[in-house]
Image: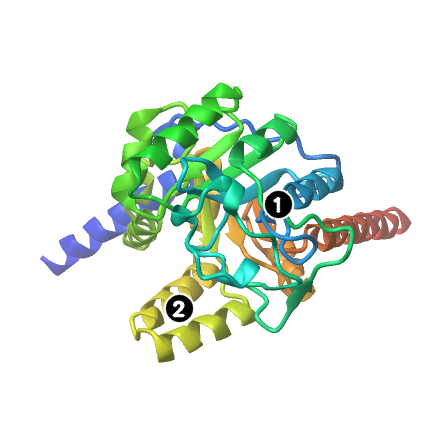
């Protein structure tokens, strides 16, 4: 009995491991999302979080244009619906952090939106503030302006913050289709049922994995079931527990809810033990990326040691520089190794 159980578990583990390494046998590789071509020497996709919150006023046309000029591959943003039915690229529920106004976006018409204030808090670098300078544009912008301005080969990832608002879901899809960006836009919400609703509205636009499914897929991975599970989504943005993010979540756990402690633990487990899962998702055509890394040493660690395809940062210019430096270092090491081999 015991021997049979051991043999069964060994057979199951071996089968699971084999298909984890060779997902192409069971699954057709996803091809909905058309990612830009990486330049020679690039090993990761550059993703500008909110256009680059540490380098320009976040979620503004100025931020998006700056990141495009840097050669960023993906622009990440959020959208909310104004009182008069306009989709704006905006993260928070209200204008307090951005404009020192308590009004909510959903209660404000587009032409009544306040200007951006002089100093802005940055979510993933809590000790820093972004100080606006005279050349910075202080106006918020719309999703349509973003789609009109950004070249079509640059991918735009959109999180719909008004996730229970059917008008917001439909208008987001309508704008993407209007501008012919079905294969270069990633959309989604953090709510599974609303992400499913988005998929029903248009099955051609790539979806990102909502938090609930991310937990489910990680559980399947540890149980050995992931190779046999259908994955509907086309992109996976996973949190990375940086020092700043860890400190922020510990404070929130102490002051808001203890339920954040399991989230912290699960994220750290994923970051340190799920590299084979990330590689498996990559092989299945899922675009994997980590958010949000702003410190040099943490960015370098991911570049050197992770299978993740993309890195999301508030500092796209610095991220691009580090990627170049790491590529140069890799080329130097290869040249040095080749020289030693030839000398033997």
Residue that protrudes farthest toward the front in the picture:
112
Residue 36 at x, y percent in the picture: 63, 30
335 left or right of 315? right
Query: Which residue is painted at 46% across and 52% down in the image?
Result: 238
Corner quadrant of residue 35? top right
According to the image, label 2 marks what residue?
264
Query: Mark number for residue 254?
Result: none
Q: Position of residue 127 (x, y in %)?
A: 61, 73
Left or right: residue 166 versus residue 343 is: left
Q: Earlier in the sequence, mark 1 or mark 2?
A: 1
Q: Secondary structure at mark 2?
A: helix
Q: Work out whether residue 165 or residue 268 is closer to the camera in this orientation and state it.
A: 165
For disc 1, the marked residue is: 60
Q: CA distance from mark 1 to mark 2?
A: 31 Å
Q: State which mark lies toward you, 1 or 2.
A: 1
**Does any portion of residue 171 appear in the rendered image?**
yes
Q: Position of residue 308 (x, y in %)?
A: 54, 48
**For this rendering, which residue is in front, 128 or 142?**
142
Q: Element under label 1?
A: loop
Q: Is residue 327 left or right of residue 293?
A: right
Residue 118 at x, y percent in the picture: 67, 62
């Amino acid at each position: 009995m015991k021997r049979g159980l051991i043999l069964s578990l060994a057979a199951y583990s071996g089968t699971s491991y084999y298909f984890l390494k060779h997902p192409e046998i069971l699954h057709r590789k996803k091809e909905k999302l058309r990612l830009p071509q990486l330049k020679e020497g690039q090993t990761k996709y550059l993703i500008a979080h909110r256009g680059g919150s540490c380098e320009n006023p976040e979620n503004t046309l100025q931020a998006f244009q700056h990141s495009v000029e840097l050669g960023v591959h993906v622009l990440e943003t959020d959208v909310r619906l104004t009182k008069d039915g306009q989709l704006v690229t905006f993260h928070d529920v209200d204008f307090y952090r951005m404009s020192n106004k308590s009004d909510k976006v959903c209660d404000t018409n587009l032409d009544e939106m306040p200007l951006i204030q002089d100093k802005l808090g940055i979510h993933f670098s809590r000790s820093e503030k972004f100080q606006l300078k005279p050349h910075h544009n202080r106006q918020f912008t719309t999703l349509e302006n973003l789609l009109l301005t950004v070249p079509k080969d640059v991918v735009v990832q959109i999180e719909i913050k008004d996730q229970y608002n059917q008008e917001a879901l439909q208008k987001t899809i309508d704008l993407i289709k209007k501008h012919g960006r079905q294969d270069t836009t990633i959309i989604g919400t953090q709510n599974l049922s609303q992400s499913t609703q988005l998929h029903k509205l248009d099955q051609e636009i790539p979806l990102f994995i909502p938090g609930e499914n991310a937990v489910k897929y990680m559980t399947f991975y540890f149980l050995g079931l992931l190779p046999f599970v259908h994955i509907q989504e086309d992109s996976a943005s996973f949190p990375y527990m940086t020092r700043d993010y860890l400190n922020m979540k510990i404070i929130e756990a102490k002051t808001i809810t203890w339920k954040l402690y399991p989230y912290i633990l699960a994220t750290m487990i994923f970051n340190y033990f799920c590299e084979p899962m990330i590689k498996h998702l990559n092989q299945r055509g899922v675009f994997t990326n980590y958010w949000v890394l702003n410190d040099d040493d943490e960015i370098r660690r991911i570049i050197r040691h992770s299978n993740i395809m993309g890195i999301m940062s508030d500092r796209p210019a610095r991220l691009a520089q580090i990627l170049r430096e790491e590529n140069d270092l890799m080329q130097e090491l290869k040249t040095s190794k080749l020289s030693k081999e030839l000398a033997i």
